[in-house]
Amino acid sequence: MNLISVFFIGVGLSMDAFAAAICKGLSIRKKFLEKSFVIALFFGVFQALMPFVGYLLGSIFAEKLQRIDHWIAFVLLSIIGVNMIRESREKTCKIEEDKLDLKNLLMLAIATSIDALAVGVSFAFLNIKISMAIFVIGLTTFIISFFGVQIGKAFGIALKDKAQVTGGLILIFLGLKILVEHLGLLTI
């Protein structure tokens, strides 16, 4: 898998964090840039950490499952993508007061990065260079989340569902691409 594909996986995975960042942006009134940075840092770090943990877990089984690894990657990415699209229909966004509750932010960062754990498992099956992948995914999520907070303050919740649908479609497409490539139907 090349750098461009990993970047698009990072974009797809970051859409849950982007949606959450938009919600956080709705409530920030003071120290906006500082709080935007902290929110983006939490999301970026956990989006990078979870694929690494998944990679370590997947590495244990990668050799045994090598013949069906492309199917596993396809199924995991498709399930995550479909779930993101399904979640986009939820029009809720809990608006909190203007303080950063670090415990709440930690739980939100973990919740929005669970999908990345499953992607990390598929990375182990596909022999992806994990250091490059976690750097790209973490940095991509940080940047997208930072701008998500800005967008939340400026535009409100209107973009939350579109971000989740876009992220879901990207992950489904990449899962399909992996499957088609490994079946020999496409060579990119």
Image (cartoon, helix red, strand yellow):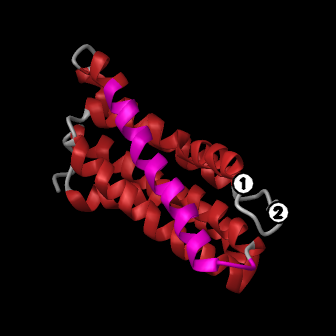
Q: Which residue is disc 1 drawn over?
A: 101
Residue 72: x and y, percent?
Answer: 39, 30
Q: Nearer the viewer, mark 1 or mark 2?
A: 1
Residue 37 magenta-highlighted:
yes
Image quadrant holding the C terminus, namely: bottom left
Point out which mark residue 173 bears.
Answer: none
Residue 179: x and y, percent?
Answer: 32, 41
> Does label 1 or label 2 sit earlier along the sequence?
2
Q: Is residue 8 left or right of residue 35?
A: left
Q: Is residue 76 left or right of residue 99?
A: left
Q: Is residue 138 left or right of residue 155?
A: left
Residue 65: x and y, percent?
Answer: 29, 18
Q: Which residue is disc 2 drawn over?
A: 96
Q: Are marks 1 and 2 in contact (CB under 8 Å)?
A: yes
User: Can you tell which quarter of the image residue 23 is in?
Assistant: bottom right
Question: Who is closer to the viewer here, 78 or 134?
Answer: 134
User: Can you tell which quarter of the image residue 164 is in?
Assistant: bottom right
Residue at horizontal 46 percent and vertical 43 percent from the top: 116
Q: Amino acid at mark 2?
A: Glu
**In terms of secondary structure, where does tag 2 sit?**
loop
CA neighbours of label 2 inside 10 A, class few (<14), some (14 to 19), many (20+): some
Residue at horizontal 31 percent and vertical 57 percent from the top: 136
CA neighbours of label 1 inside 10 A, class few (<14), some (14 to 19), many (20+): few
Residue 180: x and y, percent?
Answer: 29, 45
Q: Main secondary structure of the magenta part?
A: helix
Q: Amino acid at mark 1?
A: Asp
Magenta range: 29-56
